[in-house]
Every structure is written in C-alpha cells, then in structure tokens.
C-alpha cells in the first residue's frame, strides 16, 4: 500500500529591508512614546522598504532566490508560486506573475492570495494540497507585504504596529509523513468593518475626494480587532491540538503571527507553552502581515530539528484566522 504524500517544507528564505523605523522615530511623527508602544505591543522597531519603484516583489524575489540558492534549484523547476499579500505591486496583474518573471521561473504558474495576516497560512494550506494531489512537485509560497505603503503615519494607533518584509517556503512531496499535517482555516466577513481600506476598490474607486479624506490607508479599530484576535488565535490553536490528540508538551515551537506580543502570549498560555518555545521577533519587525510566519521560520531555521512539531497560528483582517500543524522535515 503506498503511503500518503504530504507536502514537506524543504527550504525557507526571507528578506527584510535595511531601513529601520524605531519607536523613537515615531515619537517625532505622532503623539506617542517608546514606552507605550513597547508595553502595549512589544514592538521596538520595524523595517521600511524605501526606493522608488519598489513594491512587494522587490522583497519576495530575494526571499525566494535564497531558497533556490541554498537548495541549488533552477528557477525553471518551480511549478507554482502563490504570493500572499494585501499590498500587491499593482491591483493587476498578479504580483505572483511579476515575481516569477523576475526569478526566471518560466515554467511556473501562480496567483495572488489575499487573506491579510492569515494570508501565509491560507497559502501554505493551498500549496500543500497542490503537492498532496500529486500534480505538482515544487510549490513556492511567499508572504510579502509593504505595509508602509498603506499605513497612515498620522494615525498613531495603527502606524506603530506595521512594517515591511517577505518570507518564503518551498513545498515538495514527502512519503515519510513530514510536512503539513493538518490545518484549520476560518473566516468571518462581518469583521470587515473593523479593519479595511475604505477606498480604491470597486465600491469606492480612487478620486480626489478619497485621497483628501485619507481613505487609501489601512483603517483599524484596534480594540475589537485585539479582542477577536486573542480569542480567535488561542481557540483555533487549542482546537488543532485537540483534533490531533496533542498537548503543548508535544509541540516544539509555536510560530505565531506577530501582531501584538499580548496576543502571542495569550495563545501560548492557552496551549500550555512556555515562552522558550515561542518564536518572537515582533520587537524587530513589527507586524509584516503575510510575512510574519515565514520570517520566523527563516530566523529560526537553524534551530529547527527534523521531526519537530510546529503549530503555525494567525489572525487577520477580514476577519481571517487559522492554525496549521507542521512536522519539520530537515
Ligand atoms: C492597536 C493596539 C496596539 C492599541 O492598544 P490598546 O491597548 O487596544 O489601546 P486603545 O486603542 O484601547 O487605546 C488606549 C489609549 O491609548 C491611546 N493610544 C492609541 N495609540 C497610541 C499610541 N501610539 N501612543 C500613545 N497612546 C496611544 C488611545 O488614544 C487611548 O487613549 P484614551 O484612553 O485617552 O482614549 C491594540 O488594540 C492592538 O494591538 N490591536 C490589534 C491589532 C492587530 O492585531 N492588528 C492586525 C490584525 S492581525
């Protein structure tokens, strides 16, 4: 009897821009202070992508190239690339196409996937199913966001949270049970009113009035988002453990979306995991939306051991949320 094919993560890459925006820089831009930001969010600085003509593809390409280089893979071998982002280079064409072109991935097809901060988990689950089906052998999932392009640096409650970055993983078939083992994904469109961009879509196309009203920035009501995020991320992570007959003791690492340190702590507590088992880099990068989880994997890659069980967990605008169980394959 042939074993079930799973989608193993076989490589990780990441990219963060050089320019830093510290809490002290923000003190000069809005009425805030380092102490407030650190105690309320855990963030100390974020990276900002600067330079004319640079969008999310400029960060995604080096992140994917890092994997290709480490694994000695020709870009022509990539079958499919899923680009998870809320800040595409352009509304169309899909940024996935632009990334594939820049990589020289001429045999790949791809598409953009928009699920805000849960984008990477949606993309990972989708990419894993393409591998499990037996149809594709090399699927790249990249989470890349240039939040500085849509953040209102006059809105002190929102601009302190976000930063720019990209992270990517390569998925390949595995016959020994490594890779994506289970995933729970959820969405609730009634959460739209708390976190969205008011103009620039088909409901309210761009006009001089929408620009003047600052409606092309991310609008967020922090408190309700916080409440939903704490419950959503903690509940779904606990549910994933329960469905797989696991406890916190079985988990080597929690890889949480990095939105707010208090949300991360609540999720870890609910799962019975000590801080040492939680990947946290929010202090350096802030919330990079679809990039937070792959950026954690990138940073912790050398500490991961074959067979480690990881829970990846996220909550984002939409609302969207989810948790994914991964058995590390190398
Ligand atoms: C945005 C967020 C950090 C705000 O923290 P909070 O503890 O909820 O703060 P509140 O919004 O209740 O505001 C508390 C006070 O701080 C003030 N405040 C807001 N931003 C501030 C800032 N940057 N500096 C100083 N004071 C600030 C508010 O005006 C308010 O003052 P008031 O009490 O006089 O009215 C928090 O709500 C959050 O992290 N939400 C979730 C965000 C998130 O995860 N988003 C991405 C989706 S995954």
Image (cartoon, rainbow, N blue to C red):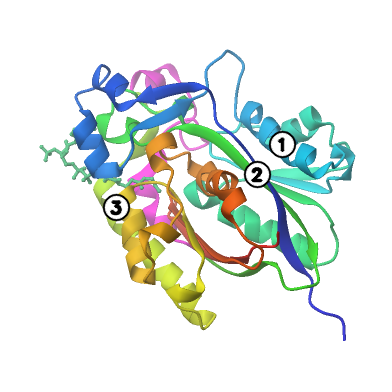
Q: Position of residue 195 (x, y in %)?
A: 37, 44
Q: Please name whichever residue, 67 or 160, is drawn nearer the observer in this view of the structure.
A: 67
216 vs 7, left or right, is: left
Residue at figure coordinates x 19%, y 24% from the top left: 31
Give the mark, 3 or 1, whose residue is nearer the N terminus: 1
**Foreground: disc 1 or disc 2:** 1
Q: Secondary structure at mark 3?
A: helix
Residue 135, can we see it?
yes
* Image mark count: 3
- Ligand 1's image quarter is top left
Label 1: element kind: helix
Question: Distance between the Cα atoms at labels 1 and 2?
Answer: 9 Å
Residue that lies at the very extreme toward the bottom in this rendered image: 1
Q: Position of residue 123 (x, y in %)?
A: 63, 53
What span is colored magenta in the figure?
186-213
Q: Which residue is mark 1?
A: 66
Q: Which numbered circle lies on residue 257?
A: none
Determine whether 268 is above or below 83 in the image. below
Residue 181's quadrant in the figure?
A: bottom right
Secondary structure of the residue carrying tag 2 is strand
Q: Which mark is residue 168?
A: 2
**Callout 3 environment at 10 Å: few (<14), some (14 to 19), or many (20+)?**
some
Residue in view at x 52 percent, y 17 percent: 50
Circle 3 residue: 262
Looking at the picture, how far across and down is residue 24, in whole percent?
Answer: 28, 22
Q: Is residue 254 left or right of residue 99?
A: left
Of the numbered discs 1 and 2, the one sitting upstream in the chain is 1
């Amino acid at each position: 009897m042939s074993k079930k094919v799973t989608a193993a993560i076989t490589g990780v890459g990441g990219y963060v821009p050089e320019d830093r925006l510290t809490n002290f820089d923000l003190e000069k831009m809005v009425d805030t202070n380092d102490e407030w930001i650190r105690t309320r969010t855990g963030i100390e600085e974020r990276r900002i992508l600067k330079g004319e003509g640079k969008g999310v593809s400029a960060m995604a390409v080096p992140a994917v190239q890092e994997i290709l280089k480490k694994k000695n893979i020709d870009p022509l071998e990539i079958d499919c690339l899923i680009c998870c982002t809320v800040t595409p280079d352009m509304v169309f064409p899909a940024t996935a196409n632009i990334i594939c072109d820049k990589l020289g991935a001429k045999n790949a097809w791809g598409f953009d996937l928009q699920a805000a901060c849960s984008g990477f988990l949606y993309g990972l689950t989708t990419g894993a199913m393409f591998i499990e089906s037996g149809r594709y052998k090399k699927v790249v999932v990249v989470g890349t966001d240039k939040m500085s392009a849509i953040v209102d640096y006059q809105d002190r409650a929102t601009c302190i949270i976000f930063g720019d970055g990209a992270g990517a993983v390569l998925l390949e078939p595995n016959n020994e049970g490594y890779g994506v083992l289970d995933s729970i994904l959820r969405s609730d469109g009634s959460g739209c009113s708390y976190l969205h961009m008011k103009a620039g879509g088909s409901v309210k196309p761009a006009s001089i009035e929408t620009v003047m009203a600052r409606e092309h920035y991310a609008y967020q009501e922090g408190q309700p988002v916080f409440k939903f995020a704490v419950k959503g991320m903690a509940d779904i992570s606990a549910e994933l453990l329960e469905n797989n007959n696991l406890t916190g003791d079985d988990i080597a690492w929690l890889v949480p979306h990095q939105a707010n340190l208090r949300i991360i702590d609540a999720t870890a507590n609910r799962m019975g995991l000590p801080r040492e088992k939680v990947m946290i880099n929010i202090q350096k990068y802030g919330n990079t939306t679809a990039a937070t989880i792959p950026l954690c994997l990138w940073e912790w890659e050398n500490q991961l051991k074959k067979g480690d069980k990881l829970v990846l967990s996220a909550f984002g605008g939409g609302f969207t949320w989810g948790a994914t169980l991964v058995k590390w394959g190398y």
